[in-house]
Image (cartoon, grey):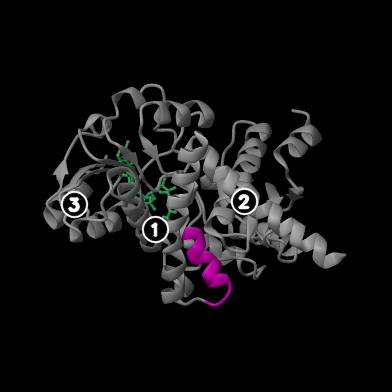
Amino acid sequence: MNLFETVTEMGHEQVLFCHGQDPDIKAIIAIHDTSLGPAMGATRLWPYATEEAALQDALRLSRGMTYKAACANIPVGGGKAVIIAHPEKKTEDLFRAYGRFVESLKGRFITGQDVNLTPEDVRKISQETKYVVGVEERSGGPAPVTAWGVFLGIKAAVEFKLYTQDLKGFSVAIQGLGNVGQNLCRHLHEQGAKLFVSDISREKTEQVKRLFGATVVEPNEIYSLDVDVLSPCALGGILNSETIPRIKAAIIAGAANNQLGVEALHSQMLAAKGILYCPDYVINAGGLINVYNEMIGYNEEKAFKQVNNIYDTLLEIFDKAQKQGITTNDASKQLAEERILKARHLKTMAAA
Ligand code: NAD
């Protein structure tokens, strides 16, 4: 990889390689764009096969955070950090050393919990830096807020595509009944939607069947159901050349990150089938909005109110896509880029 060429092409401002021998630490902090505010992005710990794979992950995910924050219309930029380590090698010293690197950026980067980190690990990082969010005692877990945003996103998509605001009798297939999926089921059930669900955990499917009268299907069956909405709330990469031809739903609207296997190709395949795709980083921004509110002094009511904007943002994106004949994925990128350019322009004017 030609490092500076890649970073320039992707638009990153700064990439920090964190290294130490005692404790042994290898981490990468990628700051993509701070035009809108300090870069926010959770920290992932993963035993990457190569250092290049770790760097690619940090670069790709931090850029995604910039778009997510811009579409959510909150004054933060995009960042991401990866610690290259096996989960079995986690120690307090490792997290504290990492926390000192975060602190050294003096608030240009604010982080939280991602894959393989627990709330306890985040607490260890926070012993060395105040630039940490998502601490459970302060704002609670983000999942209920994320689920509320996804629910509103489904409503916006149903209004745009199926011309109604009433979800009564509409069928929704939910893949994944974790923290977000179960909260989403509750909202949809309260509105009278018919639920079809799958999870690899039988305990979870039985619970949702009992609580919300959902019909349980096998994990692989979820794609081909004849439903109005498919809501991926489990894994990334599930919208691909194998699954898209099987999808009968008119709308895809779910919480999972990076749902499109290959962004350009698979968003185009969905559009060609007339399926309305809600860009994942727009509809699932509730978690980011929640931690942003933690940063400015948590107020649950205010956080939920900001999440309500996801509804209008998605309608704006659908409209843009339809008018310009582009995919919703491209329309959301355009919206994000417009907001970033405007912020840069205002900064330049203020400095002049
Ligand atoms: P979670 O880990 O609580 O739940 C994921 C669920 O998916 C689990 O119940 C798991 O058993 C199930 N699952 C795994 N493989 C499956 C398969 N093949 N078929 C069906 N189910 C399967 O995660 P979560 O917090 O509910 O988040 C759900 C998704 O949304 C994740 O992709 C996450 O990255 C994304 N997301 C979450 C938040 C948040 O606030 N929690 C915010 C933004 C994005």
Seen in the image, is 141 located left or right of residue 288? left
Of the image marks 1 and 3, the number of the one nearer the N terminus: 1
Q: Tag 2: residue type?
A: Thr
Of the image marks 3 and 2, the number of the one nearer the N terminus: 2
Seen in the image, is 105 located left or right of residue 131? right
Instruction: Locate residue 293, reporting x and y percent.
Output: 52, 70
Instruction: Locate residue 64, reporting x and y percent.
Output: 58, 45
Q: Which one is in front, 107 or 204?
A: 107
Q: Which one is in front, 161 or 24?
A: 161
The quarter of the image holding the N terminus is top right
Secondary structure, magenta segment, majority class:
helix
Q: CA distance from mark 1 to mark 2?
A: 18 Å
Q: Which residue is mark 2?
A: 66
**SS at badge 1:** helix
The quarter of the image holding the C terminus is bottom right
Instruction: Locate residue 145, reporting x and y percent.
Output: 39, 63
The answer to whether mark 3 is within 8 Å of ligand 1 is no
Q: Which one is in front, 2 or 164?
A: 164
Q: Which residue is mark 1?
A: 149
Q: Tag 3: residue type?
A: Ala
Residue 302: which disc?
Answer: none
The residue positioned 36% from the left and 62% from the top of the image is 144
Instruction: Locate residue 347, reporting x and y percent.
Output: 77, 62
Q: Where 263 sits versus 23, above or below?
A: above
**SS at badge 2:** helix
- Bounds of the magenta segment: 287-297
Seen in the image, is 29 located left or right of residue 284? right
Q: Where 70 sits versus 197, above or below?
A: below
Q: Which residue is mark 3?
A: 193
The answer to whether mark 2 is within 8 Å of ligand 1 is no
Of the image marks 1 and 2, the number of the one nearer the N terminus: 2
The residue positioned 44% from the left and 63% from the top of the image is 307
